[in-house]
Image (tube, helix red, strand yellow):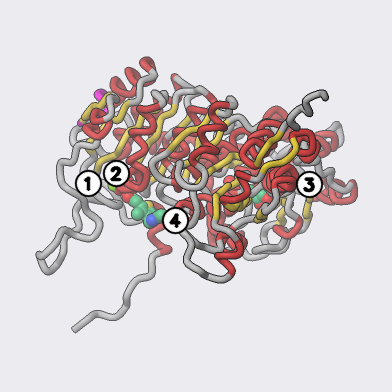
Amino acid sequence: AAVQAEPELTDGFHLVIDALKLNGIETIYGVPGIPITDLGRMCQAEGIRVISFRHEQNAGNAAAIAGFLTKKPGICLTVSAPGFLNGLTALANATTNCFPMILISGSSEREIVDLQQGDYEEMDQLAIAKPLCKAAFRVLHAEDIGIGVARAIRAAVSGRPGGVYLDLPAKLFGQVLDAAKGEASLVKVIDAAPEQIPAPSAVKRALDLLKSAKKPLIILGKGAAYAQADDDIRELVERSGIPYIPMSMAKGLLPDNHPLSAGAARSTVLKDSDVVLLLGARLNWLLSHGKGKQWGEPGSKKFIQVDIEPREMDSNVEIAAPLVGDIGSVVKVLLAGIDSSWPGVPSDWTSTINAKKEANISKMAAKLGKNASPMDFHGALGALKQVIKERPDAILVNEGANTLDLARGVIDMYQPRKRLDVGTWGVMGIGMGFAIAAAVETGKPVLAVEGDSAFGFSGMEVETICRYNLPVCIVIFNNNGIYRGTDVDPTGRDPGTTVFVPGSRYDKMMEAFGGVGVNVTTPDELKRAVDAAMDSGKPTLINAEIDPEAGSESGNIGSLNPQSVVKKK
Ligand SMILES: Nc1ncnc2c1ncn2[C@@H]1O[C@H](COP(=O)(O)OP(=O)(O)O)[C@@H](O)[C@H]1O
Ligand SMILES: Cc1ncc(Cc2csc(CCOP(=O)(O)OP(=O)(O)O)c2C)c(N)n1
Ligand SMILES: [Mg+2]
C-alpha cells in the first residue's frame, strides 16, 4: 500500500516569523532569554536582522525611533516580567511621541497567572501594558498568530501612530499546526495607515482664516517630519511665504538657514503672530499650552491645527480652524488653495522677523568659535555646528539638559528626520538606542551629542555599538555632573547629589570594547576628532572636557522646578 506522506507541519515559532516577514518586518531589536531565545535565533536564521542589546529599554527606544524613521512599526522583543517591564518605558515614550512600535514579550501561561500560582517571571503583562500604550493584544492559539500580528501592525501605524503591546505566552511557540492551515491563517495588512482626507469645509475655513492673517506663522512639529511629505511642506512654506518655526525633531524639514525660518526669532513670532498654523505639533508644554505671556495678549491668536487625531483639537486652547487628516493629504489640498487668490504675507511682518533673526544670530555667533580651554558649551557646540554643516546627511542624536537645550539652538539641521532627541517627555536615556537604530535603519553616520548624565542611562550599549561595528560617534559633554559639576553636600559627608567622579574618562569605556576613545579639551581638537570618526565610520567615543561651572540648572526649563519657600531654622 502507498506510504501515507507525513502532513507538513508548522508551529508557533514559524508562524510568528512568517507573519512578520509577510508584513515587511526586516529588523528586530531585543534582549534574548526564556521564552524567546530560540525565537530570536530562528528569526535571524530566516533572514530577519536581530540586534541584541544589553538592556530592554534601549532595545525599545531603538524600535521606537526605527518606527519614526521608516513609518513601519519598530519591533522590540523581550522576555517576560522584568524584561517586559524594562521595555515598557520605551513603549510608553513611543506612545507619547506618536512613534509606531510593537513590544513583543514572552509571557507565562494564563491558567497559572490567573490563579497566581507563582510561575517563573509570572506577571499579568497584558493588563499592565494596556494603560501605557495605544493598543494591547494577546495570542493563545497558533492559528490566531496571523491576525494578532496584523492587528498589532495596523494599531501601531494607523491614525495617530503609537506603541502596541503583543503578548505571546511561552506555550504558544511550540503549538503545532498543519502547514497549509498555518499558511492560510497569515494576514498581510492592506493599507495599514490609510490616507485621511480632510473635509472640504474644514479646508475652506482654514484657508479663509490664513488669507485674513496680517502676521501668519507656521509651526512644524515632529508629526510633519514623520509624515514624509517633505517636498509639499517645503512648497507650502515657500509658495505662501509664511515664516515658520520647527519644533526640535522637525528641524531640517526645511534647512535651518532657510530665509523663511524664524527659529532665531521664536519669541517674537510666538508673541506677535495673529494666525498660527500648527502642522503636526501639539500645543502642549513645549509650546506653553498655547497661552501665557509667551503668546502675547490673551485672545490675540487664531489657531489652525492640522492633526490626524481629531481629539487633539481644543486640548489646550480653542482651535478656530481644526483640520483633521494626515499631513500629506492636508498639505496637498492647502497647496491647491494657495493660488492667484493668495494675498501673500505683508512685508513689514517678514522684515520685522528678519531684523530680530539677524540680531539674535550675530549675538549667538559671538559666543561660538572661541577656541578656549576649559571649553564651555558654546565653544564645543560651535565645532559640532560646523561638522553638521559639512556633513548634512549625518544623523544627530541629542540628550541632556544644557547639552540638549543649547545644541537645539546652535546646531542647524539641513535635512528632514536627522535630529532625534528626547521628544515630548524630555526623557533621558534615549541616546544609544536611538543611535543604534539610526545607524541600522539608515546606514548613515550618527553623531550622538550626550550630556554625561544622559549618556549614563544607556552607556552600556557602547558594547552593542562595537559588536555590530556601527558608524556611531558619541561626544560626551563632560561637565562632571547633572547641569553643572559644582554641587556639594552641605554636611560634607558625600559628593553633591548632582555631581560625578571628577576627571572621569568615558572614552576608556569605548576602548574597553575595541572602539576608538579620544579625550579633547578644545573645540579644534573636538572638530578634528569628530571628523576622523565620521571619515573612519568606526565606533568612537569622544570625552569632551566642559567647564563644570558652565551650565545652568535644568537648562532652559529651570522654571518648571518647584522651589521651597520655607527656610529651615
Ligand atoms: N501622519 C500624520 N498626519 C497628521 N498628524 C500626525 C501624523 N503623525 C503624527 N501626527 C500628529 O502629530 C502630532 C505630533 O505632535 P508633537 O509630538 O507634540 O510634535 P512636536 O513635539 O514636534 O511639537 C501628534 O498630535 C500626532 O497626532
Ligand atoms: C529618565 C529620566 N531621569 C531623570 C531626568 C531628569 C533629567 C533631566 S536632564 C538630566 C541630565 C542632565 O545632565 P547632563 O549631564 O545629561 O546634561 P548637562 O546639563 O549638559 O550637564 C536629568 C537627570 C529625566 N529627564 N529623565
Ligand atoms: Mg552634565
Percent across and percent down for residue 256 are 53, 32
Is label 4 or label 3 in front?
A: 4
Residue located 21% across and 32% down the image: 508
- What kind of element bears circle 4? helix
Q: Quadrant of the N terminus?
A: top right
Q: Relative to 165, say whether 361 is above or below.
A: above
Q: Is the CB of the residue bearing disc 2 within 8 angstroms of ligand 3?
A: yes
Q: Which residue carries the number 4 mark?
A: 82
Task: Please say if 416 is above or below 112.
Answer: above
Q: Is mark 3 within 8 Å of ligand 1?
A: yes
Q: CA distance from mark 4 to mark 3?
A: 39 Å
Q: Residue 480: which numbered mark, if any? A: 1
The type of residue carrying mark 3 is: Gly
Q: Main secondary structure of the magenta part?
A: helix
Q: Is residue 114 visible?
A: yes
Q: Earlier in the sequence, mark 1 or mark 4?
A: 4
Q: Is residue 195 magenta?
A: no
Cα separation between marks 1 and 4: 31 Å
Magenta extent: 521-525
Q: Does the magenta run of residues contain 523?
A: yes
Q: Residues within 10 Å of mark 2 (few under 14, many from 20)?
A: many
Q: Quadrant of residue 193?
A: top right
140 and 202: which is toward the camera: 140
